[in-house]
């Protein structure tokens, strides 16, 4: 099941990045000589599954694997117990409990701990305070860095990055972003040109350039493969993640949630047996984990389409497979039969994929056909068109009155606030009063968080109408089935973040964009990194030098989102790269792939949420 060949199918071979991370993991394991059991932080299991398959771990004497949990460790014969955990203080308490329980029964096992991605003095001090620090034979780090999801997408898998950067002013993630960029440059060459927008982007640039200067003995001998780095702060475009995603992959994420390219789907989407489907449907709760990546050719085609275009592709695929089946029935000669048998595995895989995506599309359509979905979408479209954004919206009032999920209500209010450049104090107080009355006073700290990051605020300078006009954010009559503009991803709204990337396709700097950039928060960044002239000559075929071949290949831009990006933004960048006259190919990196629910949820303080299991 562990096919990762889709990672190496682009000019920037991201399989190399995965290999580097695998080597780091194996180096950690080989520090513990002998049979070993791994105890994983539950947030790391999905991530690590994309790096190393169990068979590889077995080759390095891993016998069993467990998820970190309170109390006693499960029984195992392995001598070494190896923890891979994120540096969280609450996690240290669980580990201390595990060790004390193990020692109480007279166990002589060796303990090892690897912090992901970096060691933490706070956590080490906590282990000392809990009297278990001396129990560890190894205390080290496993620098997991970016995880390749696709041949053009990498994720740092830091789900709290936005909250930590903008609420807590904790810039740990920024150092991880800078480190990941250093690793990328070690593998693919120094990136000559750096552009950024926002405070966090400026900090990352500063950290990265400082690190490069400190590595005085380091001189990359790798020909630069990436022409340009574009760093984008999430808070320069808060509207895009708040909007409902309307591309196929984005809708799957909104409805079912995709984690580490895997999705828990209703089992009746997967089983082609009608009796099984009926039984599972009756049970109602059966779910199956499915990998969603470009090794599935049909998904690769569907993923970035507006959902309204999906049915036609599924119908075309069904007809194609029916025609191939007909070939089998009409095959008469031995040669024709052999040819069909050779194609059979491919046909069976294609049928399975068609069934899966037809099932998913049916589930999505059930959701999008609901009056409530359409009303919510209509409300969003009113907001980004600037209609009635300065008054209490009837649909939001209805949602509060019927006590719809808090995240849904806050997402809409924040969208209205962003498209109105803030609320007048009277409207802001009205919404707060209604929310307090329905959802409780526990929301106070959540409001403070939303205000701090700029999602809820009092009226400021009216930037949105100017941005909407100058960046052509709203596109009327956009073609959803055969798109001619990135606005298709939100059926009429173009992500601000991607409009900036689109501007840079035809420009070598921010020049000409200064007045628009002033309307967005944070500084503009532009830096150039020195590269040996010999490497620049070698790179002439794609770095835009005088080499006559340079026009044959589009330039490669690495777009790095700090604070998360959406599948809609990924789809929009892919759309730009797939145009006939495309001048840029994109590699996309992000601290995490998110949607609007994730963004709002990260800002809701725990005591304002329903109880969450540890």
Image (cartoon, rainbow, N blue to C red):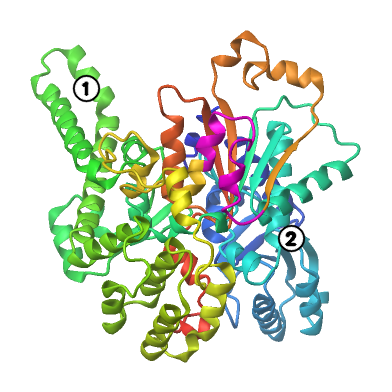
Q: Please give the residue where the numbered disc 2 appears in the rendered image.
A: 118
Which mark, by number, is residue 340? 1
Q: Disc 2 vs disc 1: which is toward the camera? A: 2
Q: Position of residue 400 (x, y in %)?
A: 31, 81
Judged from the image, the secondary structure of the residue bearing numbered disc 2 is loop
- Which numbered disc, 2 or 1, marks the residue that appears first in the sequence? 2
Q: Position of residue 424 (x, y in %)?
A: 46, 75
Is mark 2 in CB contact (under 8 Å) with mark 1? no
Q: Give the range drawn in magenta.
A: 500-522
Q: How many numbered circles are shown?
A: 2
Q: Is 243 included in the stretch rendered in magenta?
A: no
Q: Which of 248 and 17 is in front in this view?
A: 248
Measuring 41% from the left and 64% from the top, which residue is drawn there? 415
Judged from the image, the secondary structure of the residue bearing numbered disc 1 is helix
The image shows residue 602, relative to residue 578, as above or below, that is below
The image shows residue 114, relative to residue 294, as above or below, that is below
The answer to whether residue 265 is seen in the rendering is no
Q: Nearer the viewer, residue 332 or 406?
A: 406
Q: Position of residue 315 (x, y in %)?
A: 16, 37
**Dot 1 surroundings within 10 Å: few (below 14), some, or many (20 or more)?**
some
């Amino acid at each position: 099941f562990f096919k990762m060949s889709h990672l190496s199918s682009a000019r920037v071979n991201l399989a190399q990045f995965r290999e580097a991370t695998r080597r780091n993991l194996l180096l950690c394991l080989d520090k513990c000589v002998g049979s070993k059991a791994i105890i994983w932080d539950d947030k790391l299991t999905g991530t690590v599954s994309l790096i190393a398959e169990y068979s590889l771990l077995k080759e390095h004497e891993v016998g069993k694997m467990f998820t970190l949990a309170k109390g006693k460790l499960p029984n195992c014969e392995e001598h070494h117990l190896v923890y891979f955990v994120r540096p969280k203080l609450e996690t240290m308490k669980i580990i201390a409990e595990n060790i004390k329980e193990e020692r109480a029964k007279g166990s002589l096992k060796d303990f090892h701990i690897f912090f992901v991605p970096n060691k933490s003095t706070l956590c080490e001090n906590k282990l000392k305070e809990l009297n278990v620090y001396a129990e560890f034979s190894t205390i080290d780090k496993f620098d997991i860095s970016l995880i390749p999801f696709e041949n053009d997408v990498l994720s740092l898998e830091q789900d709290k990055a936005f909250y930590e950067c903008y609420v807590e002013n904790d810039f740990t993630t920024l150092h991880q972003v800078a480190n990941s960029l250093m690793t990328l440059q070690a593998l693919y060459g120094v990136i000559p040109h750096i552009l950024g927008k926002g405070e966090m982007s400026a900090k990352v640039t500063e950290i990265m350039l400082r690190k490069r200067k400190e590595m005085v003995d380091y001189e990359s001998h790798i020909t630069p493969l990436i022409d340009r780095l574009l760093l984008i702060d999430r808070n320069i475009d808060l509207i895009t993640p708040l909007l409902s995603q309307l591309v196929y992959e984005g809708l799957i994420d909104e409805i079912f949630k995709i984690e580490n390219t895997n999705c828990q789907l209703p089992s009746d989407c997967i089983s082609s047996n009608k009796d099984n489907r009926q039984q599972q449907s009756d049970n109602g709760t059966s779910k199956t984990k499915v990998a969603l990546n470009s090794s599935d050719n049909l998904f690769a085609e569907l993923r970035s389409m507006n959902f309204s275009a999906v049915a036609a592709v599924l119908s075309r695929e069904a007809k194609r497979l029916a025609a191939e089946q007909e070939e089998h029935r009409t095959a008469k000669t031995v040669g024709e039969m052999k040819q069909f048998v050779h194609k059979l595995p491919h046909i069976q895989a294609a049928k399975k994929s068609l069934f899966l995506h037809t099932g998913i599309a049916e589930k999505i359509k059930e959701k999008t056909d609901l009056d409530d979905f359409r009303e919510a979408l209509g409300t969003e479209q009113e907001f980004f068109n600037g209609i009635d954004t300065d008054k209490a919206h009837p649909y939001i009032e209805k949602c509060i009155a019927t006590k719809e999920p808090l995240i849904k209500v806050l997402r809409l209010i924040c969208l209205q606030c962003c498209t109105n450049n803030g609320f007048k104090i009277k409207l802001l107080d009205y919404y707060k009063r209604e929310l307090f009355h329905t959802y409780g006073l526990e929301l106070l700290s959540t409001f403070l968080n939303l205000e701090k990051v700029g999602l809820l605020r009092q009226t400021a300078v009216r930037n949105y109408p100017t941005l909407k006009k100058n960046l052509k954010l709203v596109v009327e009559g956009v073609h959803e089935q055969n798109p001619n503009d990135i606005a298709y991803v939100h059926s009429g709204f173009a992500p601000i973040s991607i409009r900036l990337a689109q501007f840079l396709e035809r420009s070598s700097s921010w020049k000409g964009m200064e007045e628009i950039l002033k309307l967005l928060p944070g500084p503009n960044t532009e830096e150039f990194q020195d590269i040996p002239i010999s490497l620049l000559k070698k790179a002439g075929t794609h770095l835009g030098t005088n080499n006559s071949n340079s026009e044959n290949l589009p330039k490669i831009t690495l777009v790095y989102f700090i604070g998360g990006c959406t599948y809609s933004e990924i789809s929009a960048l892919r759309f730009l790269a797939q145009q006939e006259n495309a001048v840029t190919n994109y590699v996309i990196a992000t601290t995490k792939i998110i949607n609007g629910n994730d963004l709002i949820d990260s800002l809701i303080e725990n005591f304002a949420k329903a109880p969450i299991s540890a």
